[in-house]
Image (spheres, rainbow, N blue to C red):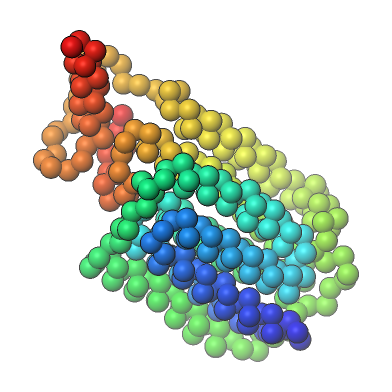
Amino acid sequence: MSPGIGSWITLSSALFCIGLAGVMLRRNPLVILLSLEIMLNAGNLLLVAGSRYVGGNDGHVLALTVMAVAAAEVVVGLGLIVALARRGAPLDVDELRSLRG
Amino acid sequence: MGIVIFYLAGAAAIGSAIAVIVQRNPFLAALSLILHLGSLAALYLVLQGDFVAVAQLLVYAGAVMVMFLFVIAYLGDRADLDLRRGGIGAGAAAVAGLAIFIETVVAVSDSNSVLTSPAQVADSFGSPQTIGRLFLTDHLLAFEAISLILLVGAIAGVVLGAGDLLPKRPEGAPDEREPRGERYDLRRELQRREHEAESEVGA
């Protein structure tokens, strides 16, 4: 016994919106990255659920692809944060407005 | 059974996701995210996505979150900024999030008769063998693209982590930036520090 796909869509959408609110509310880039992970995982959950209900493994393949992309994204994001911290910049995305030079 | 785990793990996922975004301490936020990823892995198991569930635990809860925790530990109390946007930003975030969620709920409640039960699948559904075969046949392009993305990510991690490799502005290049009042300016701050260091050496 398993819930209909509507329940999965609702759960995934709730998680996505929580992540979206986190990205828009928080100013600490670390927490923004964490919220991005929540959004990506909400998408993954929907992919796997769709795969199960339609019957086919393509959703799983796409979910694994998203995981790899998310890992690369985290590497770049954390690298940027560490580079900023080394230069003594504040960890606050509202203050980090100048990207030149 | 499946429906019980769905509600338990779904509630855990939502609760820990909310904990991530309201938590002041980034370390505790990262730990909440690990709980979130774990409950998602349980949900994948309900959906017979065995391989995805294991990959979720290994790649996300294992590798990615360890990297997060290392960076948070490296930054120490500098990461510990309790910063929220107030006013317009918070309102826009709430409206955007709620709008998407309500739209989805309405769309779902309109289509209750679609896909109410899972498809009939073979035992090999979601097994590593099946997914590996798909990756090497139908989705070979995605497979190769992943390898490129991970390579670029690794290079970016090294370049950004070893700050000395970043290109520097040439000596004596004109600074075309207009001064911007009281706002924090990274370049000016760096110049000030260099100047201080030089004057210390001179003294």
Q: Residue at x 48, y 28 (%)?
A: B162
Specify the farthest residue to the left: B181
Residue B92 drawn at (x, y percent): 30, 68
Specify the farthest residue to the right: B123
In terms of depth relative to the viewer, which is nearer, B26 or B203? B203
Q: Residue at x 24, y 13 (%)?
A: B201
Specify the farthest residue to the top: B202
Tell me, yes or no, if residue B25 can be seen here: yes
Q: Is residue B44 left or right of residue A36?
A: right
In the image, residue B196 sits, relative to residue B13, either above or below, namely above
Residue A62 drawn at (x, y percent): 67, 57
Residue B194 drawn at (x, y percent): 25, 21
Specify the farthest residue to the front: B203
In terms of depth relative to the viewer, which is nearer, B172 or A55? B172
Q: Quadrant of the N terminus of chain B?
A: bottom right
Q: Is residue B158 left or right of residue B194?
A: right
Q: Quadrant of the C terminus of chain B?
A: top left
Residue B186 drawn at (x, y percent): 26, 35
Tell me, yes or no, if residue A13 can be seen here: no
In the image, residue B201 sits, relative to residue B96, either above or below, namely above
Q: Residue at x 56, y 46 (%)?
A: B67
Q: Is residue B147 left or right of residue B188?
A: right
